[in-house]
Amino acid sequence: MANGFDARLQTQFINTLWWHNNPYLLYKMVKLKINMNYEEAYNKALKVKWKVEPCFSGEECWCRLIVPDEPINYGPDNLEEVYIVSSASINRKMAEYIVNIHNQFINNEK
Ligand SMILES: [Zn+2]
């Protein structure tokens, strides 16, 4: 019986240790705190430079994406990404025009 009790305590102890030393759980906990939500991510996007990128069809496609210079991710798993303008919305000329104006504005703010 004493052995059974010890074993249970030991299991509890190991579980506690596992929980506190588990790098994956710690990583998840830290990440949940750091991750931005939708609003924070899009507010941040207004303050950074943008760039024009080809869509997934490549350079030959008429459309262009507008994305933040550095990707901005958000959401519980940080898998959502900010797109200023997604595919099939504007052509290259318009995209470059908007990005130039935005980036000049950002430069003037600094
Ligand atoms: Zn396209």
Image (tube, helix red, strand yellow):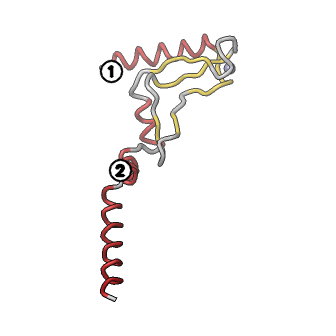
* Above or below for 19 versus 10: above
How packed mark 1 is, by other alpha carbons closer than 10 Å (few <14, some 14-19, many 20 or more), is few
Residue at 57% x, 16% y: name it. Answer: 95
Q: Which quadrant of the rendered structure holds the N terminus?
A: bottom left
Nearer the observer, 3 or 48: 3
In the rendered view, does 75 fall on the left or right side of 56? left
Q: Residue 23: which numbered mark, if any? A: 2
Q: Is mark 1 within 8 Å of ligand 1?
A: no
Nearer the observer, 31 or 74: 31
Nearer the observer, 23 or 79: 23
How packed mark 2 is, by other alpha carbons closer than 10 Å (few <14, some 14-19, many 20 or more), is few
Assign ligand 1 to one image quadrant. Answer: top right
* Above or below for 88 versus 28: above
Nearer the observer, 67 or 32: 32
In the rendered view, does 51 fall on the left or right side of 91? left
Q: Amino acid at mark 1?
A: Glu
In the rendered view, does 98 fall on the left or right side of 92? left
Residue at 35% x, 16% y: name it. Answer: 107
**Residue 77 % position (x, y):** 48, 46
Q: Amino acid at mark 2?
A: Pro
For numbered disc 1, what is the local secondary structure? Answer: helix
**Dot placed on the residue nearer the N-terminal end, 2 or 1:** 2
Q: CA distance from mark 2 to mark 1?
A: 41 Å
**Residue 48 % position (x, y):** 40, 25
Q: Which quadrant of the rendered structure holds the C terminus?
A: top left
**Residue 38 % position (x, y):** 48, 42
Circles 2, 1 touching at the beta carbon (< 8 Å): no
* Above or below for 99 versus 27: above
Which image quadrant for residue 44?
A: top left
Q: Is mark 2 within 8 Å of ligand 1?
A: no
Q: Which residue is mark 1?
A: 109
Which image quadrant for residue 16?
A: bottom left
